[in-house]
Image (cartoon, helix red, strand yellow):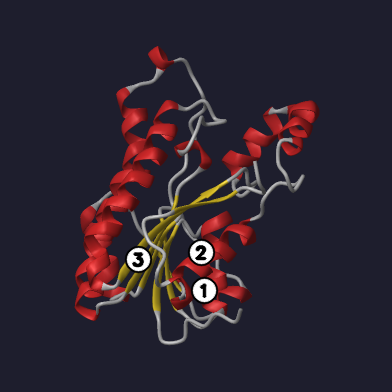
Amino acid sequence: MNISFKGRRALVTGVAHGIGRAIARELTQSGAAVAGADILDVALGEEDKGAAFARCDLTKRADIESLVRAHGPFDILVHSAGGVCGQVGRPLEDVSEADWNAIIAINVTATFLLAQALAPAMKAKRYGRIVTISSGAGLGVSLTGIQAYAAAKAGEIGLTRQLAHELGPFGITVNSIAPGFVRSNPTSEKQWQSYGAEGQRQLIERIAMRRLGTPEDIAAAVLFLASDQASWISGQTLSVDGGK
């Protein structure tokens, strides 16, 4: 299937590395005009020609509105930023309110603020594609053991379903992708190493395809859901996890 995004403008978050970076590159190479956002500085490579990257705190409405004014309006939103904010699994009673709020903010609140900022232009055009990157942790139990992460990803999936019903009459689809384990950033790499050789072997043996995912695996699914070929798919969460 040859998917083209020529003439489309896309906003991709979490582009400093890993999954978000792969999504931004694939959309750019497929013809989209891509603006990337991350709280970290982004080093540009040869593959990023044509994309515009900005440093942005996605938990702040003012930062998002500034980003939209500078680079929008957008036809496509992919919210890949999120994760565990550098945290590790701890007993419930050891988790501070600030640590809980940080994970909820970047995963759930940012999804809401981004959709809220981009929806008016999409509604006016009667076209839009919103894709959230959630996690298998939102559908089951998180391998990280982080309570806020499991709750945030479940919340992101619930918000995806709700927005799909609200925005569908305007020609806007809203879907989520729930990746399996992908070694895509320093945090996931640290988690992978913590399992040791035996734990790594057991994790891979629980995957039908007997391999970990790659950022490109996730990007391929995003491109489909963001395309016109997926115009009658909305409110769905697609597990891209190699089969479990």
The vertical placement of 184 against 234, above or below, is: above
Left or right: 174 as drawn, with respect to 3: left
Q: For mark 3, does the 10 Å Cα neighbourhood hold few (<14), some (14 to 19), or many (20 or more) residues? A: many
Compare residues 168 and 189 and report the one nearer the observer.
Answer: 168
Under mark 1, the amino acid is: Leu
- Nearer the camera: disc 2 or disc 3: 3
Q: CA distance from mark 2 to mark 1?
A: 9 Å
> At label 3, which amino acid type do we have?
Thr
Residue at image mark 1? 27
Q: Is residue 190 above or below residue 45?
A: above
Dot 1, how many residues are within 10 Å of its Cα: few (below 14), some (14-19), or many (20+)?
many
Query: Mark 2 near mark 1, Cβ–Cβ under 8 Å?
Result: yes
Q: Is residue 89 left or right of residue 109?
A: right
Q: Disc count in the image?
A: 3
**Disc 2 designates what residue?**
222
Farthest-out residue, top: 93
Q: x, y (%) of residue 124?
A: 19, 78
Report the Cα–Cα distance between label 3 and label 1: 17 Å
- Residue 148 pos. (x, y %): 39, 30
Q: Which residue is mark 3?
A: 173
Q: Residue at 50% of width from left, 44% of height from top?
A: 135
Which one is closest to the eye, mark 3 or mark 1? 3
Above or below 75: residue 190: above
Left/right placement of residue 2 relative to residue 105 reads: right
> How far separated are the C-alphas under marks 2 and 3?
12 Å
Q: Amino acid at mark 2?
A: Val
